[in-house]
Amino acid sequence: MVVARVILPGAASGRALKVAALSFWGGVDPDTGTLTDPSVAHHGECIAGRVLFVAEPRGSSSSSAVMLELLRNGHAPAAIVLGRVDAILGLGIVVAREMGWPAIPLYELAQQEMSAIDDGADIGIDADGRLSRLRT
Amino acid sequence: MQLSMDERAALDGRDGPAAALAMRVLAQTARMMGAERLIAIESAHIDGCLYHGDSGTLFAERLVEGAGRAGVPTTLNVGALDLLHAGRVKLDAHKAAMARRMMDAYVALGCQPTWTCAPYQAGHRPRTGAHVAWGESNAVAFCNSVLGARTERYGDLLDICAAIAARAPDYGLHREANRHATLLVDCTGLDPHLLAEDALYPVLGAWLGRVAGGRIAAFAGVPRDTSEDRLKALGAAAASSGAIGLFHVIGVTPEAPDNATTFGGVPPAETITLSGAMLRESYDRLSTTSGARLDAIAIGSPHLSLDEVRRLLALLNGRKSRLPFYACTGRHTLSALERDGLLGKLSDANITLVADTCVVVAPILPDIADATLLTNSGKFAHYTRPNTGYDVVFGSLSDVAESAAAGCLVRDQSLWS
């Protein structure tokens, strides 16, 4: 069984969306949640409601503001799983909670363990970070 | 995570609702990152004043309503508006109003209206070894690497919380042990002409950002007289193509006087010997098209220094730009340009000055389908396509001047073969 480390609490389910490297600023449209960087896999798809796996979080420190905006306007992923913990995205979630907006869970999972997750699969993550494949 | 008596009092509301909120966010972030405590900081630089949506404005106004006030000297990064040149930014009325409210809120929190991504060239220069909390990835890289002050890669939202609390989580690059290089990048075999070319430095940075992962690199064989403008270009490119918060240049940057100090007394875990071919590949990757089309030129990410503007004017040598040409800079450089009587020369050369903001964070470029932008900035090269829809071609400052004067793309690629 694959178990992710819980960074910010919660449980979620949704279709897995895996990208190798992503900066939310410059990589995600804050109004719609669409992946806008042509060099990123799934370019043009929307991250809203997905369980987003980012092996390597990258780049700009404005990503926390994009995260906050997605949480306010309802286009956030259902959960985010990072290859290594990064304060920038977590912060957007922490501040959303302070503002009384819906928050999402954040997990850390080593890159090699991410390979066990099929891109596009319907998956669930429980409050202890246990990942499971949901039957469809 | 242990808070001091003083921090706990702030958390409990002694200093008002905004100070309590700031301390809660700091404490949660510290816990998230595995920090055991907070540490006092000497200054802050705020990236969070750039509008990305109404949420950021509402957050800043929540802090103002809660009697928030920066507790240390604090500068502001770019906003989404050019407050000095009305109409430069083509935001719709709602977004422009919210962006303005956001900028006003940060000033109301006691931050200095510097509106620049190069605060380190606008007088904000913490001493080597000082703990600070800086946002904006290029500013973080410069602050750590070139000034030797200590900041983690803070983001929007945490930056203002740190400024209000005058504290930062004690983790990552605040800790001495985490600042040593582990990756040696050997540049001694590179063509000296390449090392003397400004355009090498963003190419080097973009390469580093892609290969470094979470590692701290040290460059060897880079000239000792490498200018701050070159280090700024390197750091900005590295911090946009990767999560680089600190790099060293042996013999140049303050924490790298010699190999032993740079690597903390142990041998590098890995050495990469840079070749011309590796840099050629990195150079090519900074362009998204190999077409000959050119519609506009933009420079100034990070914001131009006075010296960079002077070098542009020297290369133009009285010639006018025959293409839309945007030079992005801060008020610190604008006032120096005014003092030195250079504003007229720029407008004579058909150069449009953009202040307080820039062309990849605000809609400024002409609305042209399938257009291409030329830049000498590794950071603009990285963000132009996703943020503006323009294709981008990377070139040297000479390429920029020659293309501007010719009205079409002119690139001298002989150094990169």
Image (cartoon, helix red, strand yellow):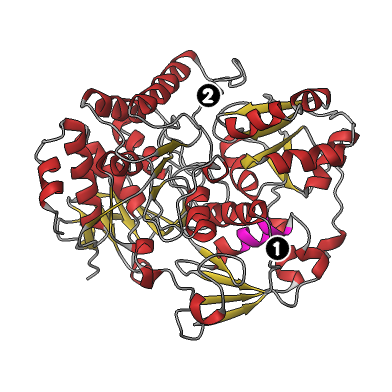
Snapshot quadrant of residue A1: bottom left
Q: Position of residue B44 (x, y in %)?
A: 39, 44
Q: Classify residue B358 as left or right of residue B374.
A: left
Whether marks 2 and 1 lie on the same chain: yes
Is B179 placed above or below A136 here? below
| Tag shown at residue B81 | 2
Q: Is residue B296 visible?
A: yes
What amino acid type should be assigned to the residue bearing mark 1? Asp
Q: Earlier in the sequence, mark 2 or mark 1?
A: 2
Q: Classify residue B402 as left or right of residue B254.
A: right
Instruction: Identify the residue under disc 1.
Output: B225
Dominant SS of magenta comes to: helix
Q: Position of residue B134 (x, y in %)?
A: 41, 47
| Tag shown at residue A81 | none
Total number of numbered discs in the rendering: 2
Depth check: B216 or A132 in front? B216
Residue depicted at 18% across the width and 44% down the height: B24
For the residues labelled 2 and 1, say whether their Cβ atoms are less than 8 Å apart.
no
Label 2 crowd (10 A; few <14 / some 14-19 / many >=20): many
Q: Is residue B219 magenta?
A: no
Residue depicted at 18% across the width and 51% down the height: A11
Residue depicted at 33% across the width and 70% down the height: A113
Q: Nearer the viewer, mark 2 or mark 1?
A: 1
Q: Position of residue B314 (x, y in %)?
A: 85, 40
Q: What span is in magenta?
A: B200-207
Q: Classify residue B365 as left or right of residue A54.
A: right
What amino acid type should be assigned to the residue bearing mark 2? Leu
